[in-house]
Amino acid sequence: MPSRPPDTATRPDLTFRTDLWSQWKMTRLYDLLVVHGTYPLLWGCRWTHPARLYRHALRPGTTVLEIGPGSGFFLHRLAPGDLKLHLLDRYPGSLAAAATRLSRHRPLLHTGDALAPLPVPASSVDLVIAGMVLHCLRGQGVAAKAALFDHVHEVLKKDGQGEFLGYTVLAHGVRHSVPGRLGLALLNRRGVFSNSGDSLTDLVRALHERFEVVELSVRGSVALWRVRTR
């Protein structure tokens, strides 16, 4: 059963974000404005770059947990038909939009915080995905958000059987266009992003401390990774 949604009545900051990630907006606007919009125009990273990570990591019959699935764009396009799929998101609207789009997989839905322990058993998941998630998590710096990596490591199968892929917009150690710098400042000011201290150096360190790095690349201001458990 999905956990209880956050109490937005006592969290004014969350009220804005819940409206921003409403089911209608995620279903109707997200692909156009974000995947085909801000990805290439602000961050210099076309959707085909993260798509390549999905293609390499997704295999038939695997158990997958996607954290922050957005509209379900990538799994809808790229996933084989026999996944055991878990979706986790803090915002019910986003979760509902992705679940509807991915209904053929009969996803198990979890409403929760990516910095909290993940709601699946330890060492039970073949693949965890966190695309465009890290830069939205509270904490000014990758080290402040490292609990995400610890929780991912906990639920992945061990001895190289579990993989973790993700991608995030960074503030330091990557290239930013002028529109990208303006967009980054605005999104941090509005509370959509929380990544003014996120750096490539800290991300690489956090991944190497916990995983065997299979692939790590930078496209524009986006770092993309694919790692596995040791």
Image: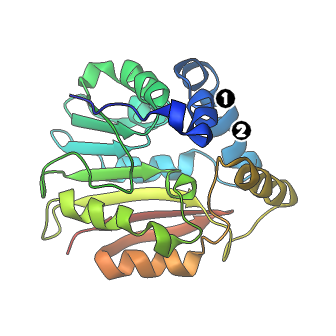
Q: Secondary structure at mark 2?
A: helix
Residue placed most toward the observer, 1 or 174:
1
Asked if residue 143 lies left or right of residue 211, the reply is: right
Q: Position of residue 211 (x, y in %)?
A: 29, 74
Report the residue marked by disc 2.
Answer: 37
Q: Secondary structure at mark 1?
A: helix
Task: Determine which quarter of the picture holds residue 156.
Answer: bottom left
Task: Determine which quarter of the picture holds residue 32.
Answer: top right
Residue 21 visible here: yes
Q: Which mark is residue 32?
A: 1
The residue drawn where x is 61% and y is 42% is 13
* Vertical comparison of 17 with 1: above or below: below
Residue type highlighted by circle 1: Leu
The residue drawn where x is 13% and y is 56% is 122
Q: Position of residue 202 (x, y in %)?
A: 52, 79
Q: Position of residue 121 (x, y in %)?
A: 13, 50
The residue drawn where x is 63% and y is 48% is 46
Asked if residue 30 lies left or right of residue 227, the reply is: right
Q: Residue furthest front?
A: 10
Mark 2 Cα-neighbour bin, 10 Å: few <14, some 14–19, many ≥20:
some
* Vertical comparison of 35 with 217: above or below: above
Asked if residue 169 lies left or right of residue 125, the reply is: right
Assign the N terminus to one quadrant of the image. Answer: top left
Image mark count? 2
CB under 8 Å between discs 1 and 2: yes
